[in-house]
Amino acid sequence: MAGYDMTPDSNTQAPAAPVGNSDLIYQLDDTPAFAPAIFAALQHVLASFVGIITPTLIVGSALGLGAHVPYLVSMALFVSGLGTFVQAKRIGPIGSGLLCLQGTSFGFLSVVLSAGFIVKGRGASEEEILATLFGICFCAAFVEIAFSQFINKLRKVITPVVTGTIICLMGLSLIKVGMTDLAGGYGAPDLGALHHLALGGLVLGTIVALNRASSQVLRLSAVIIGLTLGFSVAWFTDRVDFANMAEVPLISMPQPFKYGFGFDWIAFVPIAVIFLITPLETAGDLTANSIISKQPVKGPLYMRRIKSGVLADGCNSAVAAMFNSLPMTTFSQNNGVIQLTGVASRHVAFYIAGILILLGLFPVVGAVLQLMPKPVLGGATLIMFGTVAVAGIKILSEAGLHRRNVLIVAISLGLGLGVAGVPDVLSHMPDVLKNIFGSPITIGAFSAIALNIFLPDEQQEVEEDDYDPEAHLHTVLQNRQGDDGVDDSNLKTLSRDLTPDPRTS
């Protein structure tokens, strides 16, 4: 199928945004030789591997889906490969045409867990839980598909103060999960035992130390090195049991809707809300990617890239649900790999896709990862979830915490965290409302959106057709672990370069 060509031309290309002193060895449409291409692809896979598999490991552990985890991890890798290919290849109007990797999104983790617990609370089997989760995610993905065509219009409703509040709530609501794993995991008879805390602390300390290293390679690999070290220590201390590995099948064949197709309106609403938020994060990721790849960040070409990239996000999430995996989004840490390697060629994405698809066909990868002790996983996820919360705070600080915004954030965070801390506050509500607003993300999101609409805005309004690419760049700075692609100095430079010159207006 012919791709929808968005290659810059003399008529549509705006001046490319600078990337500091970083020079590219291979431009966006260059075709590197096999050796540099596979080397760059392996670095992208290493930088994103943990992010792709961790949400699945957490959901499988929290919902008691142990027997299915190896297959689910395989499918997460498989659909990440498919999504990465689509995003870079540009199939029709779908795909940004950039070197950006697709992976399982942490943004959906809290609402997916909430939906899973709702279904599990009704006495559903493991297969029924998975059927409902994937059915809901499949339907909710069409919210993002529709949103992609109006992203420049709806930004007045889903503003930085709304996204910042919701992303902050995402991170804060997940920290309990990370801390529980670090202490030994849900249901552990020796929860909080010193050997659990020591193992989790080793992983956490390793990641912190490597993140302060001068080498960009070490910073990008901090999480995977920390997990590998923790897993090795657990293995040598007889806390990892490989006895059941012989039962793992050699190959996992993707089966559309293997567990069936279920749906639940109550569980659907919170997930649909997050599908309205992640496109804004994707827009920021794609903007940063365009900047690093020396592509335009203004004009029709840029807007086509944003819309096509967000559309690909939605379509890839629908495909992910079809192939029994959680929703996907673009990974911002791979922007750092582009800067590190100097390789921005989208053809490298085809190698990345091939590697991920191959990994996804072998369930032994998921089976080994399932054996990872909870404190090892908790030591890494605690930092990741805290980083998500900090990313929300960054967005709020850049949106400006004047009187109106403080009121929106204070009420929304208060409601979200209040419901999480005192769930009995909704005990006398109908079950439908109780289940919908029992999620801190949902009640916080509805509060932030409603207040943002009805409270008068004291700020100067921007023209509706002028999409501000800087508005969501902050979501790229530290939204996921290991992102060294854009720092504060870069952002100041971009702020200057993206500000219209009043003499030309």
Image (cartoon, grey):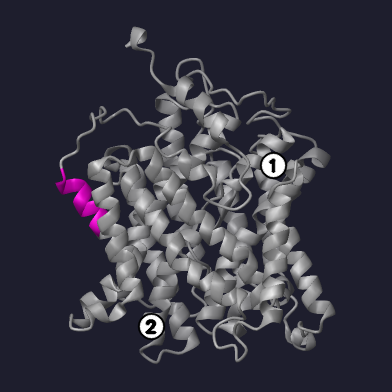
Q: Name the residue beneath numbered marker 2.
A: 119
Q: Earlier in the sequence, mark 1 or mark 2?
A: 2
Compared to residue 404, the image places residue 425 above or below, namely below
Q: Residue at x 25, y 31 (%)?
A: 464
The C terminus sits in image quarter? top left
On the image, the x and y values in percent for residue 349 come to 65, 45
On the image, the x and y values in percent for residue 214 come to 75, 41
Q: Which mark is residue 321?
A: none
Crowding at dot 1, Cα within 10 Å, few <14 / some 14-19 / many 20+, comes out as many
Instruction: Identify the amino acid type marked 2.
Output: Val
Whether residue 28 appears in magenta in the rendering, the answer is no
Dominant secondary-structure state across the stretch colored magenta: helix
Magenta stretch: give its range: 447-455
Crowding at dot 2, Cα within 10 Å, few <14 / some 14-19 / many 20+, comes out as many
Nearer to the camera, 222 or 11: 222
Nearer to the camera, 167 or 338: 167
Q: Quadrant of residue 204?
A: bottom right
Instruction: Identify the amino acid type marked 1.
Output: Val
Nearer to the camera, 409 or 90: 409
Q: Name the residue beneath numbered marker 1.
A: 348
Tag in front: 1 or 2: 2
Q: Residue at x 39, y 92 (%)?
A: 123
